[in-house]
Image (cartoon, grey):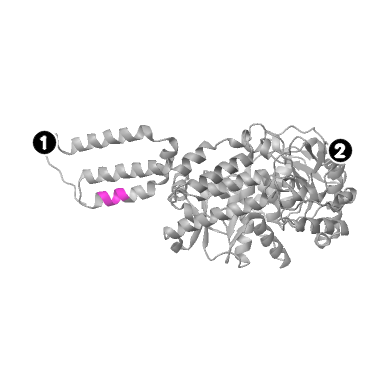
Amino acid sequence: MQTLTNSRPMQVRKTGWRLGIRRTFTQIRAILPNIKIIVLLSVLGNLVAFSIRMTKTFLQPHTLRAFRTELLDFLKHTEQAASSDTNRFLKSLRGWEDATDPMVIAQKILQKINTIKPDNYLPDLWFQLANAYFLAGRFKDYESSYINGLKELKKARNNSSLDKLGVKFLFLEDWGWVIGHISHLDQLVKLRELGLLSSHRRILVLSPEDGANKHYLKYWAQHLDVLMLSRHEARQLASIMRPLAEKLSGFALKDRFSMFYESWNLAVDNWNRKRYPPLLQVSKEDSENGWGVMDQWGIPAGSWFVALHVREYNPHTPNHNRLRAAPNADIQTYMPAIQSVIERGGWVVRMGDSSMSNLPTMHGLIDYANSAFKSEWMDVFLWASCRFFIGTSSGPLSVPPTFGVPVLYTNCPNIGISAALGRSLMLPKLFHSKSEQRLLTIDEILAGPLGWTVSVPGDDIELRDNSPEEILAGVEEMFSLLEAGSDAFDGLTELQAEFSRRRDIYGRNASTPIAHSFISVHQNLLAETHVSRGLSR
């Protein structure tokens, strides 16, 4: 490129380029005050497309007026997109879970879907409707609404011809912001290896700055094509390639969409049936470093330990509010089980974060959650190396199985959707009717919304956490099965089989068996109850 110089002073008339620039910025300033923060974010998200436009502008011979038109059109387009009916409506719903009944919100969203203009973006409305139905315990409506959203997403993809690229992007907003979501890459990869996924090439979009556990994401980079971008670039791509996103709650199989829990069971059950090994294995470096930390804790080489994570109520965490509080539990109810592990010669490492309550100082118990050793790589080491994991309904529960580690799933609030964890047992929460002074039967729990959501019941129904005795019995049952060999998990007692059969009547969205120690105490709850099945779901 030649550089032109001219020693003569440039004479510019008031109608020249300076006036053009002044007019341009005057018009931009007139637009900017009307652009909300979401518009500015959208501007950033569309910067790639805008950059292409700018490049064409400067490479082709046209005037500044043409560039100004391009810029103003772009800003107007971005403002219109962000201020669309869909975005304005969804923005008005923010924070509704703190104060509004899910069915009230569901009705509002349905009205909006029925009245919205065809050119507005519909998938997000369907996805938000699905979320409201899930919190209301209407599981079938949740699934059908989410599938409608996936169909709208496919329609948007086809209309833009983007599907010709033959790819689906796994963006962190779906797959990386919480640890449990990352672990569900396990099901996606297994379905691909089993030949059940659609033919799209899956690309995991990562940025060095983002992710609930970036070290754990590196493990998955071994099994997926990865596009490493800066945070800014990743958000740009997510905005532009929105129709090509692989949504966490619904996978694209070869012949249909498969909802999350169905996909989970499909992947794990078929994978285990073929006796395939777990996808992940702790690295030599993480293992050596992890045992180095254990040595500092006074845990001798060759020792074994059980990892524990109990979701405690945290008022500063949005998803611990009234509509998502059912998974919460009291760590103190786990103390007899902790003592049992220690008496067997093992150690217990309590995982979590510094917001959790402190545990008493006792030999054999490590309160890692409140220690100075917290790190992402150490989390991965503990999940992958424990003898088994004791957890509640929260993200870490599904991580150990990706390394082939068994799980004791305690305080499960939604027995209808406790998906396959492999070589694991489940202890459900129970529901007590205050007016009738009795526990609800399994049929009564599954026929209504109680067995399908994470919300706390109404005034008459009381949610009963697992007792210390139930948790202790579950831990002892895990030891018995592990000592008998991995095949011991394949056989079910008559009571366990009856529970699974009863659960399957209402929908095949669950597969982790109930602990025999639990159902043997509460076998009266298996009595058939004449209830209207599926009406509230």
Mark 1 neighbour density, 10 Å: few (under 14) some (14–19) many (20 or more): few
Looking at the rendering, which quadrant does residue 379 occupy?
top right
The residues colored magenta run: 53-57
Q: Is residue 127 above or below residue 224?
A: above
Q: Is residue 91 left or right of residue 466?
A: left
| Residue 226 can be seen, yes or no | no
The residue sitting at 23% across, 46% down in the picture is 66
Please tell me whether residue 82 belongs to the stretch shown in magenta.
no
Residue 515 visible in the picture: yes
Could you tell which of marks 2 and 1 lies nearer the N-terminus?
1
Residue 302 in the image: above or below residue 325 = below
Q: Is residue 118 above or below residue 431?
A: below
Main SS of the magenta segment? helix
Q: Position of residue 64 (x, y in %)?
A: 22, 43
Q: Give the structural element (helix, strand or loop) at label 2.
A: loop
Q: CA distance from mark 2 to mark 1?
A: 93 Å
Residue 437's label in the rendered image is 2
**Image coords of residue 246 (percent x, y):** 54, 55
Q: Position of residue 203 (x, y in %)?
A: 51, 57
- Residue 11's tag is 1
Q: Residue flagged by tag 1: what amino acid is it? A: Gln
